[in-house]
């Protein structure tokens, strides 16, 4: 072996793979990559040498190469992708500011077939030139569940993302999995959560490197492996119906009185629809949304970002998507009366009252030292003699305070807070739902704040004023009611397939935990979920529902958030839906119409009775 050969070492330079697709439940491509031909230049000892202190070197040769490349680009390239000589020289990175000498320089992306043919026919005239197939990411222009799908940014932008720590630590161990600083990677949503599956494996170029860190020898090329495809549970038609319904309803509450007044500040809405028996999330809508194609280069202009900065995050799993500047109003709101079915279940299970017990509702409940605190029913209504089921039907705050909150405190004293918290978590409230997305928020558990007495916290928690949760948590809670205590793991991906269509992973329904209660308690509670809701007039199914209206103050003004949960049918339930319209007014008027349109759209596509109605037309 010659001395020169002994000095050479082989480096594997990664070449990016084609990213896998993300498809809707019907097979529509929601995120996909298209191949583009890219011209790379590997600086070689034979055609380029860094200038020495004496000024010697092949800089002039590099400039001449740039000139020849520009002539070819101008003659055979697309008119909208012109480059100047200086652009080309800058891409060469002759001073090694961005990369070592052996790393191929990306000179031009999106070559025409004529350009590709020209350079392939003249490889000997352009030493170090390679044509590599890469990809450009595209997203469905109909903007389907964009925050759930996510977006891409360059790998060098991920230093603050914990998801990439393991990848950074393993860099260099396997050339097929080595990331380059300039490659695009998942930055949110499914794109981030399933980054490893979507990315695929690098191809790589094995090159001989001399002591000057320059290529000096023959190169071997191993082609990249395409990433896996994700088949989601999102149905495009139902999702679009939900998105439009939220937009319509926000507009409606601006001009139509709800609970005696219009609600001009409503700007956002969130909806999640989850199949009761599978955990499939069919709808995940966070409105307003935006066009994910704004991230084509991993960045956008300040002007573009200023328009979407309040809504590019997923408000169904986090508190960060807000219609108010500065996030004064979060997407997580107090549950309001939607907590009452669970509140009654807790009361029954703890023996605080029986299904046959009656309570005299006088429209107000007192508690605390010398009955110094009081809670009224909505509209100051007094319902008289009511049983637990009727307390849910009429949404009696007084019942919840007297029969649940105060009695739970009397039984456990301050430990009642812990008991309440354990019940909440069994139904997915205040804990992670298990959804396959990054950055899920566990909720704001105000009942844990010790600034108030335990009795006060339990009293207010009993009718939905001590916990703020996400729409995803609300949907899982609703599905758990429908499942009579079985909390299923929600998921957005049904299966993963390889480039040949072979299933490499299939997701099966999974029960996370089971809250066990007497069947009579379930019957009592679910029978009470039958509030009259005009949006469901002529709905062809018997269904369980609960409206909610939570209140919070903003600059001295009392704002009402609309909340609505429902599952249908009541017997053998198929779909659970949760809708939140912050600042939208009473849930029956602001959130329920959105849920109705989701149920209708699902009935068309799948059938709430198992028979898709679109197949009957």
Image (cartoon, rainbow, N blue to C red):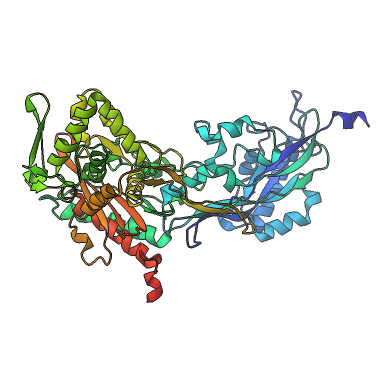
Q: Is residue 13 left or right of residue 264?
A: right
Residue 186 in the image: x percent, y percent? 52, 43
The answer to whether residue 9 is above or below residue 226 is above
- The reply, left or right, for residue 362 in relation to residue 221 is left
- Can residue 481 be seen here? The reply is yes
Q: Position of residue 230 (x, y in %)?
A: 54, 53
User: Residue at the location (73% across, 54% down)?
Assistant: 119
Q: Quadrant of the C terminus?
A: bottom left
**Total number of numbered discs in the rendering:** 0
In the image, 8 versus 59, the foreground residue is 8
Locate the N terminus and report the quarter of the image it occupies.
top right
**Residue at 19% from the left image edge and 24% from the top image edge:** 453
Q: Is residue 104 visible?
A: no
List the single residue furthest toward the bottom.
Answer: 617
Pick the front one: 191 or 345:
345
Q: Residue at x 69, y 54 (%)?
A: 72
């Amino acid at each position: 072996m010659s001395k020169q050969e002994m000095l050479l070492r082989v480096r594997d330079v990664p070449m990016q793979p084609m990213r896998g697709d993300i498809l809707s439940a019907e097979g529509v491509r929601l995120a996909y990559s298209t191949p583009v031909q890219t011209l790379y230049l590997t600086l070689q000892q034979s055609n380029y040498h860094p200038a020495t202190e004496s000024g010697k070197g092949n800089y002039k040769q590099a400039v001449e190469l740039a000139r020849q490349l520009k002539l070819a680009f101008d003659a055979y390239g697309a008119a909208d992708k012109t480059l100047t000589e200086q652009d080309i020289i800058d891409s060469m990175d002759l001073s090694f500011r961005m990369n070592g000498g052996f790393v191929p320089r990306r000179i031009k992306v999106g070559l025409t077939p004529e350009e590709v043919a020209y350079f392939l026919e003249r490889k000997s005239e352009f030493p170090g030139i390679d044509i590599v197939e890469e990809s450009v990411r595209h997203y469905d222009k109909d903007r389907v569940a964009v925050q759930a799908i996510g977006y891409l940014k360059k790998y060098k932008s991920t230093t603050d993302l914990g998801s990439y720590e393991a990848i950074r630590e393993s860099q260099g161990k396997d050339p097929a999995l080595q990331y380059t600083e300039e490659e695009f990677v998942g930055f949110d949503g499914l794109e981030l959560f399933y980054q490893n599956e979507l990315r695929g494996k690098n191809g790589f170029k094995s090159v001989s490197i001399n002591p000057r860190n320059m290529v000096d020898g023959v190169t071997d090329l191993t082609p990249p492996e395409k990433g896996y495809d994700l088949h989601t549970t999102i149905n495009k038609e139902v999702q679009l119906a939900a998105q439009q319904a939220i937009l319509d309803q926000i507009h409606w509450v601006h001009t139509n009185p709800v609970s005696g007044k219009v609600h001009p500040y409503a700007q956002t809405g969130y909806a999640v629809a989850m199949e009761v028996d599978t955990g499939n999330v069919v709808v995940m809508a966070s409105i307003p949304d935006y066009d994910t194609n704004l991230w084509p280069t991993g960045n956008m202009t300040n002007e573009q970002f200023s328009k979407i900065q309040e809504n590019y995050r997923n408000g169904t799993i986090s508190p960060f998507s807000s219609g108010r500047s500065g996030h004064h109003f979060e997407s997580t709101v107090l549950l309001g009366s939607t907590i009452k079915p669970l509140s009654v279940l807790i009361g029954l299970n703890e023996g605080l009252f029986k299904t046959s017990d009656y309570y005299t509702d006088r429209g107000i409940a007192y508690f605390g030292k010398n009955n110094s605190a009081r809670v009224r029913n909505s509209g100051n209504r007094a319902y008289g003699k009511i049983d637990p089921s009727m307390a849910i039907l009429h949404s009696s705050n007084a019942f919840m305070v007297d029969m649940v909150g105060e009695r739970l405190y009397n039984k456990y004293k301050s430990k009642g807070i812990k008991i309440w918290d354990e019940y909440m978590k069994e139904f997915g409230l205040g804990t992670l739902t298990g959804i396959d997305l990054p950055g899920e928020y566990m909720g704001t558990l105000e009942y844990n704040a010790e600034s108030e007495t335990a009795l006060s916290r339990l009293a207010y928690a009993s009718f939905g004023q001590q916990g703020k949760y996400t729409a995803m948590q609300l949907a899982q809670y609703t599905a758990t009611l429908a499942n009579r205590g079985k909390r299923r793991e929600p998921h957005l991906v049904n299966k993963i397939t390889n480039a040949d269509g072979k299933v490499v992973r299939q997701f099966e329904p999974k029960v996370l935990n089971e809250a066990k209660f007497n069947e009579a308690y379930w019957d009592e509670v679910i029978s009470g979920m039958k509030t009259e809701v005009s949006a469901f007039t002529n709905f062809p199914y018997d269904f369980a529902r609960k409206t909610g209206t939570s209140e919070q103050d903003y600059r001295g003004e009392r704002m009402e958030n609309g909340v609505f949960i429902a599952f249908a049918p009541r017997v053998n339930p198929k779909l659970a839906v949760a809708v939140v319209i912050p600042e939208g007014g009473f849930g029956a008027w602001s959130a329920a119409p959105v849920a109705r349109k989701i149920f209708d759209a699902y009935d068309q596509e799948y059938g709430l009775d198992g028979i898709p109605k679109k197949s009957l037309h």
